[in-house]
Amino acid sequence: MLDIRFVRENPEIVRESQRRRGNDPETVDALLAADEIRRETLQAYESARAEQKEVSRSVGKASPEERPAVLAHAKELAEQVKALDSKMTEAEEAYTKANKLIQNIVLDGVPAGGEEDFVVREHVGNPRDFAAEGFEPKDHLDIAEGLGAIDMDRGAKVSGSRFYFMKGVGAQLELALLNMAAAQAVEHGFNLMMTPTIVNPSIMDGTGFLGEHSDEIYYLNADDQYLVGTSEVSLAGYHKDEILDLGGKPLRYAGWSSCYRREAGSYGKDTRGIIRVHQFNKVEMFSYCPIELAEEEHLQLLAMEREMLAKVELPYRIIDTAAGDLGSSAARKFDCEAWLPTQNRYMEVTSTSNCTTYQARRLNIRERVDGRPRTLATLNGTLATTRWLVAIFENHQQKDGSVYVPKALRPYLGGKEILEPLN
């Protein structure tokens, strides 16, 4: 949700943010109208309630002749207050709905436009020249099947399309990657947590995931609960309705969980292998942060992702995501995209978002500063996920079908330097 005082004082800034996202700026006017009705209704209620109290106090002082009229007036005011109380509830609900329809205000410097309008901030590393090495690279699934690392056919037999079994060295490699990410997070002061993967509607809604992309989320109708697509959801809900003592510095968590996404609307796109699947594992960073430090913290999370990518020795680029491609909660998002040699393109492997105060307001999370509560910022970022194996298999494959293991990853893989094919 947005700070309504900011919207009242800066409506054009909010309208422009909506335009840059490709959204309807008239939603801002609808919010201001709902806010005005809410305030007018509250004022009418409070005036009637004050008059009701005054009349109630006068009943005992009224003469026998005056008392019937005073009692009738008190009854009339009681009905009026009851009706205004109902109207106030309706006005508050309408205001909240109007506020939730507006996505977070994008920060200065975020590119306008849609999915293709990102700005490349930096290229890191150089893609391998496979032609110079004398062979054509295989895609990640061919390499993985040669290693006995992934079984897509039996995954589909058991659970349907876009499910898989990660097995043998594949399972070992994924655990090694996630363990290395967890170790890095702890080393940098993050509190490691194994998070719930099923959450209540108030938590899913509070993080902003039940908007236009709600069809991506698995809903458990019998229980009125949701499967998470990232542990960001659980970690954001961890301090719901709390006032934190941050002490002027970020409070950082790292969540390890399985994640679930329906991938609705992505039919025919990246359907081969494990680029777009319904279930995967991830280590996610999450930060509760003083608002003054949010942009600096965003760069710190990006630095953590860069450190991990350096450890797995992948060429990648960093992009500043365009406003129209941001999630509803994000005010700015940086993606790290690893090079995918068989597709001659970059593929997203991490993202980190500054959600400013948007999620915290929806979840009623504040910090105490100088003895008084105030809003705080939330940020998140991916530290490692199953999809990384796609880039590792493709970029580190050898001519004989084996896969080179990056040096930093070897201690988490029993010291293995090469993953050998089965045949």
Image (cartoon, helix red, strand yellow):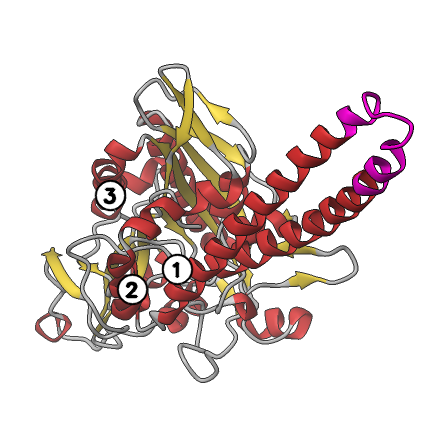
Question: For residue 72: magenta?
Answer: yes
Q: Earlier in the sequence, mark 1 or mark 2?
A: 2
Determine whether the residue tagged by mark 2 lies in a helix, strand or loop: helix
Q: Which mark is residue 62?
A: none
Amino acid identity at mark 3: Lys
Residue at image point 79% right, 42% down? 73
Q: Which mark is residue 311?
A: 3
Name the residue carrying label 2: 15
* Count of numbered marks: 3
Name the residue carrying label 1: 103
Amino acid identity at mark 2: Arg
Question: Which residue, as the protein is rendered here, is positioned at the far top?
Answer: 371
Residue at image point 47% right, 63% down? 101
Question: For residue 40: magenta?
Answer: no
Residue at image point 61% right, 39% down? 46
Which is more toward the observer, 31 or 314?
A: 31
Q: Quadrant of the C terminus?
A: bottom left
CA gap between label 1 and label 2 equals 11 Å
Q: Which region of the structure is painted magenta? A: 56-73
Asked if the residue at tag 2 contacts the one at tag 1, i.e. Cβ–Cβ closer than 8 Å, the answer is: no
The secondary structure that dominates the magenta segment is helix
Is residue 347 depicted above or below 88 in this figure?
below
Tell me if residue 3 can be seen: no
Is residue 176 depicted above or below 12 in this figure?
above
Which is more toward the observer, 159 or 422?
A: 159
Tell me if residue 225 can be seen: yes
Tell whether 18 sits left or right of 148. left
CA gap between label 3 and label 1 equals 35 Å
Give residue 136's quadrant in the image. Answer: bottom left
Decide: few, some or many residues near mark 3? Use Cα within 10 Å; few <14, some 14-19, many ≥20: some
